[in-house]
Image: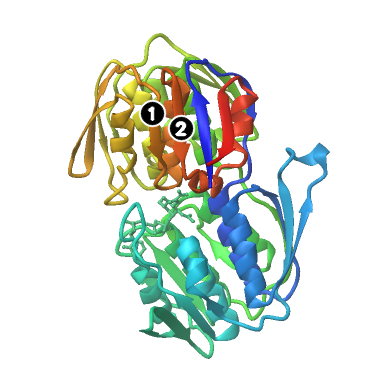
Amino acid sequence: MDRFVIRGGVPLQGVVRISGAKNAALPCLAASLLTDRPVILENLPAVRDIQTTCHLLEMLGAAVEQRQEAPASSAAGCRQIVVEARNIKSVEAPWEMVRTMRASTLVLGPLVARFGHARVSLPGGCAIGARPIDMHLKGLEKLGATISSEHGFVEARAKRLRGARISFERITVTGTEDLMMAATLAEGETILENAAREPEVEDLAQLLTQMGAKIAGAGTSSIRIQGVARLEGARHAVIPDRIEAGTYLAAAGITGGELRIENCRPDHLLAIIKKFREAGLQIDTPTPSSLHVKPNGVLQAADMTTEEYPGFATDLQAQYMVLVTQASGTSRIKETIFENRFMHAPELSRMGADIRIEGNCAIVRGKTSLTGAGVTASDLRASASLVLAGLVAEGETVIERVYHIDRGYERIEEKLRSVGARIERTAS
Ligand code: EPU
């Protein structure tokens, strides 16, 4: 198992290029199951979750071809993947896949819509919360599927799904994506209410539309899908990863550095930019696809509450927590999306941060001098926050279990090294 060894104290300087969004790429890969024609996806990040999804698609019988994109059109490392789901021989996502990656459940909607049957292992709890998929299942039932569950698997069956009006009890990102995919091949109209408005949902809708789906309102809380009999192949480049971009903004702020962040979508980061500015960063948007960040005096405490898009993303909460350990004053961070997403707090405290947890709030008192320590990554975003803490800590930080970070950040140590960080990957 790999670990990162970081020697902190270097203000980052230079240019970082953002990869394609993992959380847009995963549903787009699942959408390839809706057609027997080739789906060509571009700007895919070279991260573990993409490999896991490709493996799952192959287990189902899809042909998956991975190509390196021409260097002129993309950053090294970006991938083009062509999926052809012509000879599907299984409709089952087994436990070993779902256990490794919960987003495997995204194949549920496409499989039942196209083949009338899907069998997916139920995900258990995970490091950040219970994370059930009950709303995906209730939605499929509304679309006419019969749902049963036994031996840890959930099965959905339907001759052909029928359009329906589905109102989510609470906002769910992959739930919206799963049902939007299912509804594309249903008979008649589906209306998804209280739908997730995340850019990743909109990106998926763009791909589906290119495949011939009839979708209106993606990116708003009401999505209307007119079912069609079949979908065609398509070519689609996924959006840049807003969470990766936000992580590098935080990295610059934490180290007092100056970065230009390229190949990103500042318009997907409005709440993040606003909050980081409030905390004392100067952030400009020199072009519609880049950001420039540098210090604007000392960092100041600023309260933050995670919210669904367009609010401040829960996937940047841990990174924000490290930022405010370096700000003067007390910041109150409220986590409203997941019930157990403060696993990084005790590790940060071991590095010298002053953090008190009260229910779903973390109270962070700054500014504290962090010192290097041996810490353990618990999930993807928590791991990223430990890397950020290591960048500003005095002395050496050793982060174990960095496989979590490899799930969603492309070559993070190389990107950080290219802007001056002292970070090495070693085998433990
Ligand atoms: N929820 C339910 N029932 C459901 C579905 C969700 O109770 O059927 C609850 C969840 O337990 C959670 C809340 O609703 O408390 C919101 O969960 P959501 O379904 O929106 O999360 P998700 O779709 O499983 C995606 C991202 C996560 C990101 C969340 C929130 C993907 C593949 N994953 O998860 O990304 O944190 O939305 O924005 O898109 C990450 O990349 O590190 C990551 C965890």
**Judging from the image, what secondary structure is the residue with disc 1 in?**
loop
Q: Residues within 10 Å of mark 1 (few under 14, many from 20)?
A: many
Residue 219 picture location, percent across and down: 49, 52
- Foreground residue among 305 and 398: 398
Residue at 34% over, 39% down: 344
Label whose residue precedes the other's in the sequence (2 or 1): 1
Q: Pointers 2 and 1 in contact (CB under 8 A)?
A: yes
Where residue 356 is drawn, which disc sits there?
none
Q: Which residue is mark 1?
A: 373
Q: Amino acid at mark 1?
A: Ala
Front position in the image: 368 or 138: 368
Q: Is residue 40 above or below residue 319?
A: below
Question: In the shown orientation, is residue 94 left or right of residue 42?
Answer: left
Residue 381, above or below 252: below
Q: Quadrant of residue 321?
A: top left
Q: Is residue 167 left or right of residue 398?
A: left
Q: Residue at x 53, y 91 (%)?
A: 159
| Residue 345 vs residue 204, the one in the foreground | 345
